[in-house]
Image (cartoon, rainbow, N blue to C red):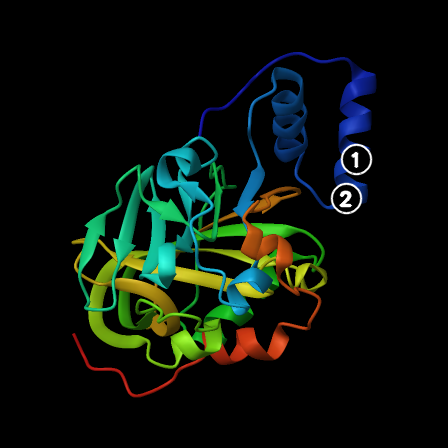
Amino acid sequence: MPTLTCEISQSLSTALEAAAAASGETVSHIVSRALADTLQVDHGTLFQVSTSGALVEGLFQGVVSVGTLREHGDFGLGTFVDLDGEMIALDGAFFQMRGDGSIRRAEDTQQVPFAIVTHFSPEAPVTLAPFASIHDLVAQLDALRHTDNVFFAVRLSGHFARVHNRVACKAGAHETLVQATSHQAEFECRDVDGTMIGFWTPSYAKGLGVPGWHVHFLSDDHRFGGHVLDCAGEAITLALERIEDFRIAIPESADFLAADLSGDTTQALDTAERVQKPAPTA
């Protein structure tokens, strides 16, 4: 990332140090956020389309296009109309990972029922300790957060010993999320180079997002990817960004406006996110 060097008054310097000490933020993050606000740059903003609660109820119709998503971020994840596969946005390229195992570039005209994207601007990268499971990885990620009450974006890059993915298959008519993911495709790959990207959502935002860590994977050769169910790796490079600005595009469809979204989605999301069956090895 570029480095900015400039002279400021002693009073500003003192105030910056005090704000960093009080909030736990780095000085560079505070300055970046202030500059973004002043210059009206969409920096450090999480942009979400629809809600996880709407997905739970089976509202899989398109809300925005991939082209519109590009205006709000170059890094993110989501799904496509009728839950037709998983989305990953990485370095500005949007990919669709489908239930038959194929991966293709998403067209700007494709519609999206749910997605979350940002312009990724992380702190300095670090190298993770070896991890043997998704639970070990999550423990390391949690140790780096320092708070449960804001959003985080994460990128993990390197050589993974094992990655177990799921890819949602196209939903049938009137299926809910739990029903649709009951016939999801699952794949496992060993010794694969690639990148995981994802987000931490605070528990108070359940019903809007997926609480906790939600991570997708794409191999460097673009032949393997999906929603991460389990993984193992060592010497993986991690880049993390703390995000405090959250914006959401609410669907205007008749189905969304008429839907009952007042229920607790915790159990349904947990069922949809977990391993459903043994995965074939790629």
Tell me which amino acid carries mark 2: Ser
- Kindly identify which numbered label has been placed on residue 19: 1
Check disc 1 and report its element: helix, strand or loop. Answer: helix
Quadrant of the drawing holding the C terminus: bottom left
Residue appearing at x 79%, y 19% in the figure: 12
**Left or right, 195 with reference to 68:** left
Of residue 127 and residue 205, the one placed in the foreground of this image is 205
- Kindly identify which numbered label has been placed on residue 23: 2
Where, by quadrant of the figure, is residue 109 drawn? Answer: top left
Q: Is residue 207 above or below residue 166?
A: above
Tell me which amino acid carries mark 1: Ala
Q: Is residue 247 above or below residue 223?
A: above
Residue appearing at x 69%, y 60% in the figure: 148
Near mark 1 (Cα within 10 A), the count class, few <14, some 14-19 or many ≥20, is some
Of residue 143 and residue 271, the one placed in the foreground of this image is 271
Circles 1 and 2: CB distance less than 8 Å?
yes
Q: Can residue 93 be seen in this view?
A: yes
**Left or right, 137 with reference to 35:** left
- Residue 42 % position (x, y): 55, 28
- Residue 129 % position (x, y): 43, 66
Q: Is residue 236 visible?
A: no
Check disc 2 and report its element: helix, strand or loop. Answer: helix
Near mark 2 (Cα within 10 A), the count class, few <14, some 14-19 or many ≥20, is few
Quadrant of the drawing holding the N terminus: top left
Residue appearing at x 68%, y 73% in the figure: 264
Q: In this view, does 58 lie above or below 73?
A: below
Residue appearing at x 38%, y 84% in the figure: 276
Determine the CA span between mark 1 and mark 2.
6 Å
- Residue 178 % position (x, y): 47, 77
- Residue 96 % position (x, y): 28, 53
